[in-house]
Amino acid sequence: MAPSLSLSVALVIVLLSGKCTALLPSYSPSLTACPDTSLTRTFTATSQELNQFESDFIAARENSVIHQSWKSWLKNGSAIGYNTTAFSNFARVGLAFSGGGYRASQFGAGVISAIDARNATAVAAGTGGLLQVATYLGGLSGGSWLTAGLYMNGFPMVQDMVLGSQPGWLMQQDLLEPEGSAAIINTLQYYSALDQSVDAKAAAGFNVTIGDGWARALSYHFLGGTNLSNFFDTSSHGAGQLWSQIANADFFNNHQAPFPLVVLDTNGTFDLTTESIPLDLPVYEVSPFEFASFDPHISAGAELSHIGTSLFEGVPVDNASCVTGFDQAGFVIGTSSNIFASLLSVDTTEIELLQSLLGEPIEALNPAEAVVSKWPNPFLGIASAKFVDSSNAELQLIDGGSNGENIPLNPLLVKAREVDVIVAVDGSADTDDNWPNGLSLLFSAERLSTILGDSHQQLPELPSSTDDFVAQGLNLRPTFFGCNSTDTPLIIYLPNSPPLTGDAPFCNAPTTQVQFEVNETQTILDQTYFNTVGGFVPNANSPDPNWGRCLQCAAVDRSRFKVTPTIKRSAFCATCFTQYCYNPSNITSSSELPNRKLTYAGPASSSL
Ligand SMILES: *[C@@H]1O[C@H](CO)[C@@H](O)[C@H](O)[C@H]1NC(C)=O
Ligand SMILES: *[C@@H]1O[C@H](CO)[C@@H](O)[C@H](O)[C@H]1NC(C)=O
Ligand SMILES: *[C@@H]1O[C@H](CO)[C@@H](O)[C@H](O)[C@H]1NC(C)=O
Ligand SMILES: *[C@@H]1O[C@H](CO)[C@@H](O)[C@H](O)[C@H]1NC(C)=O
Ligand SMILES: *[C@@H]1O[C@H](CO)[C@@H](O)[C@H](O)[C@H]1NC(C)=O
Ligand SMILES: *[C@@H]1O[C@H](CO)[C@@H](O)[C@H](O)[C@H]1NC(C)=O
Ligand SMILES: *[C@@H]1O[C@H](CO)[C@@H](O)[C@H](O)[C@H]1NC(C)=O
Ligand SMILES: *[C@@H]1O[C@H](CO)[C@@H](O)[C@H](O)[C@H]1NC(C)=O
Ligand SMILES: *[C@@H]1O[C@H](CO)[C@@H](O)[C@H](O)[C@H]1NC(C)=O
Ligand SMILES: *[C@@H]1O[C@H](CO)[C@@H](O)[C@H](O)[C@H]1NC(C)=O
C-alpha cells in the first residue's frame, strides 16, 4: 500500500516542534540473563524439523479438537455421500490470508465469519466449520493485521473483533491522520505518542526506523487497549503486547485456534515493472514460539521470546544480555506490512515527511535506512556459504508480500508440516479495480519450483498467466486447484470478488484507503460474507445452495487417501468438483459469471 499524508500536516509539523520527554517504556525491550537452553536450532532442507512446541500444539489440537470439529461440521457425512466414521484421519487444512491493507483485513474477516462454526448462519450455509478444522493459519501484511486481531484478542468472533470492542479496529479513525486534518492538534499528539514509544526502544540501544512508528500506529487498531475515547491519551495502546504471549493465552492452550504463522521478507531492489523484489531473497516466518526460515539455505529457527538478542553462530554473545520484549505484536505485523521500502524508488517526499513526524533518531537517517524494519540477526554466522545475511548483525525486513507472493502459502507448504489442503484467501489488488488476478499464486509457483524444491511442497497446475485467470473467470468465484493431483495439496482459492448478486462492490477499496466509516466496513463484511457462503451458479446471480457442501467435499477430499483401502470420491462430491475444480482440459469462461460489477462503489478517496 502507498499511504500519503496531507500537506497541511507537514506544514504544521514544521511550526510546532515542542516535544514531550516522558518515554513510554513498554515498547522498549529489556535485558535479562540468558536461559540455559539453546536459543536457536538448525536443520536441513531434506531433514526438516518443526519446533517442538509447534509439534506438540499440532498433535494436541488435532487429537483433542479437530477430530471432533470435523464430526460437528460434516455430521455423519451422509449429506456429501460419505460415512464420517470411516475416516480414521482427516486431511490437514491450512488457511492463508493475503496482504492488501485494510481491504485485505476486512475481506479476510468476512471470510472468517463465513467459515466460523460459532456463527449459526454460516453453519446453516454449510461453510461454518472450516475454521475449526484448520491446523494452521498464515497471514501476511493486511492478512497479518487480521491475524493479530484474532490471536492478540482471545480469538474473538468477527463482528466483535472488527466493529465491537474485541479490540474494535476503529477504522473510522484514519491510520495516518486520525480525526483528519480538521483536528490537526490531535494528529500531532498522536505522532508525539508514537514517537515516545519508539524513542524508548532507541534509548534501550536498538536501531529504530519508520517501521517502528508504523508498528505503533497499527497497534492502536489491531491490538487491545484503544477505543475512541482514549485514542489520543498517553496510555500504552498495545505497546508491551508480545507475539510470544499468544502461547500463554487460554484459547491457545486449549488448542481452540489454528497455529498462526506470519510472513516477513528481506529488503531488496524493487523491479519497477513487477513492483516486487527478487525471489531469491530470504523469506522468514514468525510463530508464537519462533522466528524461522525454512528456505533451504537457512533452515533455522530462533526462540521468539528472546529475539533481539545478539547471537553468533546461535550462541549469545553475552550471557548476561539476552533480550526480551523485542517481539512486540505491533512490530511483527508492522514488519509484515512494511511497504515503505517499495515507495523509496517512487518518491522519497512521503518518507521524509514521516521521518520528520517521528523526529530523532529516525529523522537523521538516510531514507533508504529509514524504510526497513530492523531485526538483530539471530542467524549471524550460520550457513555462511549461501545465506546472504550470514555476516550481517541486523536483518533488514519488509512487507511479507514484497516478492510478489502476496498469499502466505510459503509456511503452509513447508514439507514437514504435511498440509493437505490450503484455503488461499486472496485480497490482492492486481487489476485496475483492485481485484486479484492470480498473480500471487503464479509468483509462489515460480519461487517454489526454482528455489524451494527440497524444502516445500509444490503447487498444483495453474493457468499459465493472469490473463487466463481472468478470461476463465477464476478470479470471480471460488475454484479448487489440484483436485486430482496426488503429489500436491489441494488449493481452495477464494478470491475477493464482486458480489455475486450483481450489487455494487465496496470490498475492492484501494490499498491506500486507510479510513472506513462503520457502515462501509459493515457493508464490506456483509458482502464478503455473502460471497463466501454463496459459491456461484453458472450464468446466474444467485448463490449455489450446494456450495457449503461442495466446500466440505474439497476440505475432506484428501482424507480419502489416509484410509486403506482408499475411499472412492462420492458421487455428490464428484459433481461439485465438475463445477468448482480447475480442469485444464475443460476450461471455463468469465462470461458464465454475468452482471458482476467491477468498479469500486465506495468514496472516491478518503482523507488521503
Ligand atoms: C553461556 O551459558 C551457557 C549455558 O549456561 C554456557 O554453556 C556458555 O559457556 C556461556 N557462555 C559464555 C560466553 O559465558
Ligand atoms: C446420517 O444421519 C442422517 C440424519 O441425521 C440419517 O438419516 C442417516 O441415516 C445417517 N447416515 C448414516 C450413514 O449413518
Ligand atoms: C460407517 O463406518 C463405520 C466404520 O467403518 C462402520 O462401523 C459403520 O457401519 C459405517 N456406517 C454405515 C451406515 O455404513
Ligand atoms: C454471522 O455472520 C453474519 C455475517 O457476517 C453476521 O451478520 C452475524 O452477526 C454473525 N453472527 C454472529 C453470532 O456473530
Ligand atoms: C545499529 O546499527 C549500527 C549501524 O548500522 C550497527 O553497527 C549496530 O550493530 C546496530 N545495532 C543493533 C543493536 O543491531
Ligand atoms: C476506553 O479504554 C479505556 C482503557 O482501557 C477504558 O478505561 C475506558 O473505559 C474505555 N472507554 C470506553 C468508552 O469504552
Ligand atoms: C534496501 O534495499 C535497497 C535496494 O537494494 C537498498 O538501496 C537499501 O540500501 C536497502 N536498505 C537497507 C537498510 O539495507
Ligand atoms: C454510510 O453512511 C453515509 C452517511 O449516512 C452515507 O452517505 C453512505 O452512503 C453510507 N455508506 C454505505 C456503504 O452504506
Ligand atoms: C465441463 O465443465 C462444465 C462446467 O463448467 C460441466 O458442466 C461439463 O460437464 C464439463 N465437461 C466435461 C467433459 O467434464
Ligand atoms: C478428475 O478425475 C475424474 C475421474 O477420473 C475425472 O472425471 C475428472 O474430470 C478429473 N478432474 C479434473 C479436474 O481433472
Image (spheres, rainbow, N blue to C red):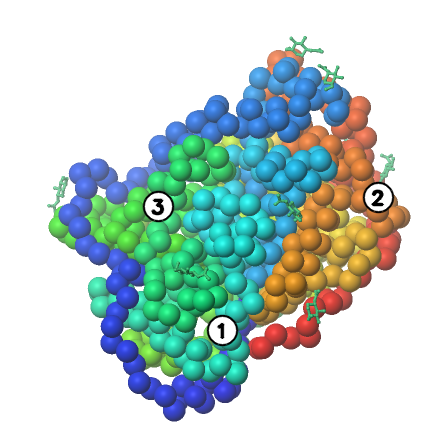
Label 3 crowd (10 A; few <14 / some 14-19 / many >=20): some
The answer, for residue 188, to whether it is visible in the render is: yes
**Amino acid carrying mark 1 in the image:** Pro
Which residue is denoted by mark 3 in the rendering? 245
Q: Is mark 2 within 8 Å of ligand 9?
A: no
Gap between marks 3 and 2 measured at Cα? 44 Å
SS at mark 1?
loop
**Amino acid carrying mark 2 in the image:** Val
The answer, for residue 280, to whether it is visible in the render is: no
Label 2 crowd (10 A; few <14 / some 14-19 / many >=20): some
- Residue at 22 percent across and 56 percent down: it is 30
Depicted 186 relative to depicted 466: above or below:
below
Instruction: Point out which mark residue 178 bears.
Output: 1
SS at mark 2?
loop
In the figure, residue 458 lies in which quadrant? top right
Q: Upstream in the sequence, badge 1 or badge 2?
A: 1
Q: Upstream in the sequence, badge 3 or badge 2?
A: 3
Which residue is denoted by mark 2 in the rendering? 537
Q: Nearer the viewer, residue 439 or 170?
A: 170
Q: Is mark 3 within 8 Å of ligand 6?
A: no
